[in-house]
Each structure stands twice: as C-alpha cells, then as structure tokens.
Image (spheres, rainbow, N blue to C red):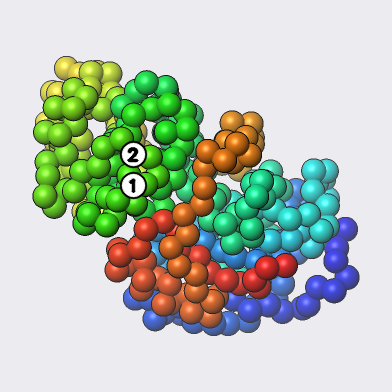
Amino acid sequence: MTDATLPADMNVVEISEPGAPEVLVPGKRPVPEAAPGEVLIKVAYAGVNGPDLVQRRGHYPPPKGASDLLGLEISGKVVAVGDGVGKWSVGDMVCALTNGGGYAEYCAVDARHCLPLPHGFNQLEAASVPETFFTIWSNVFMGAKLSRGEVFLVHGGAGGLGTTSIQLAKAIGATVVAVDSPAERCKVCSDLGADLTVDFREQDFVEIIRGAYKGADVILDIIGGENIAKNIKASKPDGRIVQLAFNKGSKVEVDLMPVMLKRLTYTGSTLRSRTPENKAEIRDSLALNVWPMFEAGKLKPVVSKTFPLAEAAAAHTFMESAGHSGKIMLEVCGDI
C-alpha cells in the first residue's frame, strides 16, 4: 500500500567527496520504494551521530546494499508498506533505526527496526532515540548485563551515548559514575542522575572510583588511547569493559596480566554491522523493557540543537566542536 501523493524526487544531503563538514551538499534523488519487508517513511527529523562523521571522512563505508546517504535514525510517517509487512500501515507515526539514508525526505527502512513514538514524545524527541538506545541497550544491558546494585562507569557522560546510558543505568538501579569535562558537562550528568561525576581534566577517574566503590562492574568507553589501560585498572574483578568508539586512538600497548588476574571481559561492537535479525531482536527487547520506562517517565530525550537538513554541514561542525550535551538533530520535513 502506498500514499498516492508521493513525489518522484526528494531533497537529500550528499557527500561530494570524503573530507571536512563542507563536503556535505544538498542534492536531489529519486524517492526510494519500499522493498518486501520494508516501510517507506516520510522523514520528520533525523539524528546526527558519531558514525555519520566517520563515514563523511571516508573511514566507515556503508554496508553492501545500504544507502550511501548518512543518517542512522529518524522519525516520521509511514507512507508506503512493502510486501510481507503486517505490523505497520500507511499513516502510522514511527521512529526507526536505519542502515543509512536518514539525511533525506524519504527513507526506506526494515519494518522490524521501527518502533512507535515513545509516549509523550514529539517527533523531534522520538528521532533522537533509536541509534543511542539500540547501541546502549544491546551493549551495556543485553551484552555486559549491567544489573541493579552494580557500579557503572561511563566516559563522555554528557554526549548522546552518555546521556542515554546514565538514564538507563539509573532506571534499572545501578550506581553511575560519569566522566566528562568541563564542569558544565559534569553538571549535565549529575542532573540526569549520576551519583558521582569526575572531571577528567582535573581528577583521576581510576583513583576516584576505586576509592569510592572499589572499582566499576561495567565500564563504557568511547575514548580509547590511554583510557584502555586505565579502564582495566578501574575495573572490579569479573568486570566488563565495553568499547564503542576510540576518539583518542584504537592502537595501544596493553598489559593483559590484570585482565587475566581480574577475569575481565573486554568487548566492543558497531551497530551498523549487525545482522537485520539481530537488530530486530534488539528492537523487540527495547519495546519490551525500555518503552515502558518512557511510559513511566523514567527516561527523557536530551536534545542539544537542531539544524535544517540543508545545514547538515553546520551540524557536523557543531558536533566536532564537542561543546554540546545530548543529541544534535536535523529538521528534514519537520512535524508531519
């Protein structure tokens, strides 16, 4: 079933060549079709995420068969339904994890990766949810199995992944230590419920967490570099370390002896490379476990700034300045 009013072409933002934010340029593309198992969404808003920046620089090519356009999360209205889709209908409002293509007025998405708008969320807020919640829930909770009463340490607490992980960890009853800088960003973490904040420019997070809690049960790191060895020191016996990015580098020399002695588990992942079936499992777990937390008011979106789609380059520049807290968003078609 298809909305009869669909245009032939749509506005998009494309990568003219790998490079700095100014390589993002407005363009025109044909409106995609909903293949079997997919829905076509008229995009209200799209999120800007770290993988977008890495792909723009030429270091994170899209998977085979995926759109070359940036944009891994969106909200909007279903305007076409492919064969074999039973859950969604034309006119439904959804938010969705995409495999690319969100920087466009229309985006075809695996129907299994869509979710209803969280209760009480507007379309902008809903678009800020999928990428970080799929990532954090699958790695920290489904993977590392953070549980009530454990100590959780998160680096980059005021960023998109950090603000999501702080809220989820507190909602399930964990103790949260957030590392960030400067003081304004640490305050964002405290306001979201972090039990303790560490300004990494002024304080040693290893010393502080070992002094306060004898270490962390689960550590989420996006920094890499020298943090890798420090995280090993900061971990409790049987601790779990999750690596989701490496802003300070991925190649380091590490002493593995404490990993063995403390029986640590060190994992990492990217969301985009997971199979469609695995993403569908994460989606179902979110619907079962996390969407009720939205209903109960335990979680809230943290949106820093919104840019028009045509100003995606400015949004990337703003994100690279590292001065924001929470998510950076693009207004594509706006409220539908």
* Residue neighbourhood size for the residue with mark 1, other residues' Cα within 10 Å, grouped as few (<14), some (14–19), many (≥20): many
Residue at image point 37% right, 58% down: 325
Residue at image point 54% right, 50% down: 129
Q: Which mark is residue 37?
A: none
Closer-to-camera residue (8/45): 45
Residue receiving disc 2? 194
Quadrant of res 278: top right
Tell me: 223 left or right of 59: left
Closer-to-camera residue (181/187): 187
Question: Can you say which quadrant of the picture contains the N terminus?
Answer: bottom right
Tell me: 62 left or right of 224: right
Up the image or down, 214 lies above or below 163; here it is above
Circle 1: element type: helix
Residue 302: percent from left, percent from top: 46, 54
Tell me: 77 left or right of 296: right
Q: Earlier in the sequence, mark 2 or mark 1?
A: 1
Residue 171: percent from left, percent from top: 47, 32
Residue 257: percent from left, percent from top: 13, 23
The kind of residue tagged 1 is Cys
- The answer to whether residue 13 shows anywhere in this view is no
Closer-to-camera residue (199/137): 199
The kind of residue tagged 2 is Ala
Residue at image point 47% right, 28% down: 172
2 and 1 marks in contact (CB < 8 Å): yes
Q: Which mark is residue 189?
A: 1
* Residue neighbourhood size for the residue with mark 2, other residues' Cα within 10 Å, grouped as few (<14), some (14–19), many (≥20): many
Circle 2: element type: loop
